[in-house]
Image (tube, rainbow, N blue to C red):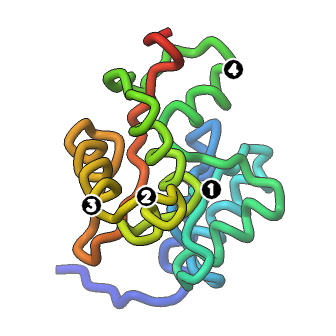
Amino acid sequence: MVSSRAHRGALDGHGTTIAALGGITVVVEAAERSGSLITAGMALDLGRSVGAVPGPVNSWMSTGTNQLLVDGAVPIRDAQDVLDHLLGAGSPNVRELGPELDPSLRAILEHVEAGHATCDAVALASDGPAQLAATALTRLELLGYLASDHTGRYSRTPLVAPIDGGA
């Protein structure tokens, strides 16, 4: 039975292989010093593109990816962004189109997209009662436009809202 201990640098060859195989290396989450950033550097050395998924500015696990974006990495929000980068404009659309939204729901959705992540924040931003904000947020979640976490914060899903009349 062969045994080896994990040590710094044990996966260096794997990072090079990963960087060399794809047309783009996408970093989803990375601390300021991480193997993902080493792999991203290897991709750049090999002439490959590097993409990064933006993360919360107050999360230590996003400092690396957010720095990659500052340094010029391709912003990646979803699979469509990867396809657009690799295949160019006109690549098959993988974003799912959601159901029509009435203007009041669209306005609430825009508040969440602007960073108002709680029911109270949305109510304040929309200048309406919290009960109406809560109802609209629940409807948007049931329609698939929003997701909520265990703290009651809402975030946008990749579902795309039709533009005026379902176009």
Q: Which amino acid type is shown beneath numbered disc 2?
A: Gly
The residue that disc 3 covers is 131
Circle 4/circle 2 CB separation < 8 Å: no
Q: State the residue at coordinates (48%, 55%).
A: 112
The residue that disc 2 covers is 128
Residue count near mark 2 (Cα–Cα under 10 Å), binned few <14, some 14–19, many ≥20:
few
Q: Position of residue 29 (x, y in %)?
A: 51, 68
Q: Which numbered disc, 4 or 1, marks the residue that appears first in the sequence? A: 1
Circle 3/circle 1 CB separation < 8 Å: no
Q: Which amino acid type is shown beneath numbered disc 4?
A: Gly
Foreground mark, 4 or 3, reads: 3
The residue that disc 4 covers is 88
Distance between mark 3 and mark 1 Cα atoms: 37 Å
Distance between mark 4 and mark 1 Cα atoms: 18 Å
Residue count near mark 1 (Cα–Cα under 10 Å), binned few <14, some 14–19, many ≥20:
many
Circle 4/circle 1 CB separation < 8 Å: no
Tag shown at residue 52 = 1
- Secondary structure state at the residue bearing disc 4: loop
Distance between mark 3 and mark 2 Cα atoms: 8 Å
